[in-house]
Image (cartoon, rainbow, N blue to C red):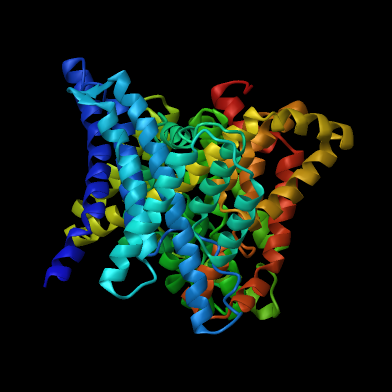
């Protein structure tokens, strides 16, 4: 009975992170209402929302660990040894991650201690350090959970959950500021990575090793985590993600699917085009192509099969098309790039529109999805398209009117200047909640609570990766790596178009090996100065970068679409991986076109916002 109650208590992380997310939604909406009525709103509201994002990130990450949702590349040793060997590998991976969390907890506490001396006030008399204290607390909780993860006895769990983070904490306390050789740490981290440790632990461990080597203060890493988490544009990430998850958990996908099928016809060609566009659109809102596969896979696979499309190609289409929404607003990677590259979010929203449709077109044409094996299929498809009843189309559009208007709420409020990025995201989240609760009556309190929890876990896991990656990136920038890269690359590759080709190939490989958010934080600050030296604008480079990352979704080991599709459709990983090979070539060709024709990406921003820098 005691342990049952304790398990219920340990869900406090979901309660805290979900509550922070609710407040992040409400405060901007209240601001929008109060400003014209009373001339002012909530005191220091933007900064308050940003710091609620830190609470969401830390406790969301703790909840993600408890539910097994922290991102890793998986163990490379799954096919080696017996069950006991696998258990030892997992203990090594989780235990090592727990030690790293202990080191990060000490580093975070020293950062918080320095902020306590500054005595800054957040709002309404609340000191800033109260919120910052969630970092050392969160890392200690993560370390305790990771340290206890692979044991069954409650007392052994407690013992290791305390001992391992404490070892890291004491180690950092003793050697912080001292110079420590890097190579033992690097070898250990490689072993931890291959054993299946969470990505944030590996990135954080590498950043710690680099700072330790030079005798620099370890508090620089939690400082980077804090800076990116409370970035002024970052609250848009969880709010847009929440809107997407709400649409994913209601029948929004069915209504949108009916619209696209009605518009493009119920034959093979129409169904294929409808599936590709729907997957791209849905990924833009849900924030993850894996969510799209899980939400739409069960709907689209029978639809494609019934239209006469082969099963393997149907799986290939859903898996690959789900990666293409990264370029469409309000996708999370698009916003993340804008934050890291310091480019206006509305510029990136406009820049991604035409390239997104170019990529869909290349996928369908060069991926071979419009190819027909029998002439009769074309005739049947054409006949069905000709017989489409405009009444049915209008009925489908009317049924999905609230979902169709969602992008206009998200993009229109931002591009028009009526709302800040955070307010635009809050409007979109509020719009999703209201329409699915009142208009469709499909969002129950239970489903809403689950959406809040899932959003907090997704964002918590992502923010851990971003924070650790930024600490690593800041070290590399301070070490002069971007300047050295510019000089070396220009000496080796003097031609701009050859550089773009090499860049596409490099980013394709990086996307296959790195999680997309880590790739954005680590690679963009290093590669953007090189791109600028060739006269490539930040907006154009961002679209090239994200389009190349789309290929990474389809390539192991980091190509999560392969794993999601394998689980969703009950097929072996090699079956799915083989099926998407034509799609990889098509996406690569589309990326080259976007790279070599800047007007595709920069045309709309220049038309509506003026010449981009």
Residue drawn at point x = 40 percent, y = 57 percent:
164
Q: In the rendered view, tell whether residue 134 sits above or below residue 113.
A: below
Percent x, y of residue 263: 48, 59
Where does the image place residue 322, in percent across and percent down from the top left? 53, 60
The quarter holding residue 132 reads: top left
Which residue appears farthest toward the front when viewing the image? 174
Is 311 located above or below residue 316 in the figure? Answer: below
Closer-to-camera residue (314/90):
90
> Can residue 544 be seen in the rendering of this structure?
yes
Q: Residue at x 54, y 26 (%)?
A: 608
- Residue 92 image position (x, y, % from top left): 50, 66
Which quadrant would the C terminus be assigned to in this image? top right
In percent of width and height, residue 449 lies at 22, 56
- Does any portion of residue 358 appear in the rendered image? no
Residue visible at 53% across and 38% down in the picture: 470
Residue 394 versus residue 420: which sits nearer the camera? 420
Q: Residue furthest left?
A: 1
Drawn side of residue 95 relative to residue 186, left or right? left
457 and 161: which one is in front?
161
Along the horizontal axis of the image, is 428 left or right of 354? left
Q: What is the quadrant of residue 125 in the picture?
A: top left
Residue drawn at (55%, 35%) of the image = 178
Q: Quadrant of the N terminus?
A: bottom left
Q: Identify the residue at the far top of this view.
A: 39
**Image mark count:** 0
């Amino acid at each position: 009975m005691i342990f049952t109650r304790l398990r219920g208590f340990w869900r406090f992380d979901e309660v805290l992170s979900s509550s922070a997310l609710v407040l992040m939604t409400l405060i901007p909406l209240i601001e929008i209402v109060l400003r014209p009525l009373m001339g002012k709103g909530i005191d220091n509201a933007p900064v308050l929302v940003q710091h609620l994002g830190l609470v969401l990130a830390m406790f969301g990450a703790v909840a993600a660990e408890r539910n097994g949702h922290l991102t890793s590349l998986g163990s490379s040793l799954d096919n080696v040894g017996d069950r006991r060997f696998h258990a030892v590998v997992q203990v090594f991976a989780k235990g090592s991650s727990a030690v790293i969390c202990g080191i990060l907890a000490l580093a975070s506490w020293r950062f918080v201690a320095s902020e306590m001396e500054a005595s800054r006030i957040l709002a309404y008399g609340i000191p800033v350090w109260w919120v910052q204290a969630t970092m050392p607390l969160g890392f200690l909780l993560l370390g305790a959970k990771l340290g206890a993860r692979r044991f069954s006895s409650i007392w052994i769990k407690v013992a290791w959950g305390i001992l391992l983070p404490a070892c890291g904490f004491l180690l950092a306390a003793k050697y912080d500021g001292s110079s420590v050789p890097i190579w033992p740490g690097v070898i250990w981290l490689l072993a931890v990575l291959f054993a299946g440790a969470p990505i944030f632990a590996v990135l954080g461990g590498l950043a710690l090793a680099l700072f330790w080597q030079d005798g620099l203060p370890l508090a620089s890493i939690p400082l980077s985590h804090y800076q990116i988490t409370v970035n002024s544009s970052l609250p848009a990430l969880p709010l847009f993600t929440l809107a997407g998850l709400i649409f994913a958990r209601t029948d929004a996908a069915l209504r949108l699917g009916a619209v696209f099928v009605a518009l493009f016809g119920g034959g093979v060609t129409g169904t294929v085009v409808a599936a590709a566009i729907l997957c791209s659109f849905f990924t833009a809102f849900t924030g993850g192509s894996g969510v799209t596969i899980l939400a739409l896979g069960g709907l689209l696979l029978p639809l494609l099969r019934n239209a006469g499309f082969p099963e393997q190609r149907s799986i290939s289409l859903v898996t690959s098309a789900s990666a293409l929404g990264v370029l469409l607003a309000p996708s999370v990677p698009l916003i993340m790039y804008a934050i890291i590259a310091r480019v206006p979010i509305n510029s990136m929203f406009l820049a991604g529109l035409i390239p997104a449709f170019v990529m869909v077109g290349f996928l369908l044409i060069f991926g071979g999805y419009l190819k027909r094996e029998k002439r009769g299929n074309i005739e049947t498809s054409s006949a069905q398209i000709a017989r489409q009843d405009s009444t049915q189309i209008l009925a489908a559009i009317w049924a999905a009117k609230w979902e169709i208007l969602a992008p206009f709420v998200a993009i229109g409020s931002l591009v028009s200047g009526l709302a800040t990025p955070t307010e635009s995201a809050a409007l979109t989240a509020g719009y999703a909640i209201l329409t699915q609760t009142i208009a469709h009556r499909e969002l129950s309190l239970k489903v809403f609570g689950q959406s809040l929890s899932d959003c907090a876990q997704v964002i918590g896991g992502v923010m851990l990766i971003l924070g650790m990656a930024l600490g690593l990136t800041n070290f590399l920038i301070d070490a002069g790596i971007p300047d050295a890269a510019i000089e070396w690359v220009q000496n080796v590759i003097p031609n701009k178009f050859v550089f773009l080709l090499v860049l596409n190939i490099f980013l394709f490989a990086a996307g296959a090996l790195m999680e997309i958010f880590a790739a954005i934080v680590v690679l963009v600050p290093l590669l953007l100065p090189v791109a600028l030296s060739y006269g490539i604008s930040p907006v154009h480079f961002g679209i090239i970068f994200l389009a190349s990352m789309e290929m990474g979704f389809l390539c192991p080991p980091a190509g999560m679409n392969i794993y999601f599709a394998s689980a969703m459709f009950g097929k072996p990983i090699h079956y799915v991986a083989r099926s998407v090979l034509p799609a990889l070539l098509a996406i690569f060709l589309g990326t080259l076109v976007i790279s070599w024709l800047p007007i595709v990406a920069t045309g709309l921003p220049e038309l509506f916002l003026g010449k981009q820098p």
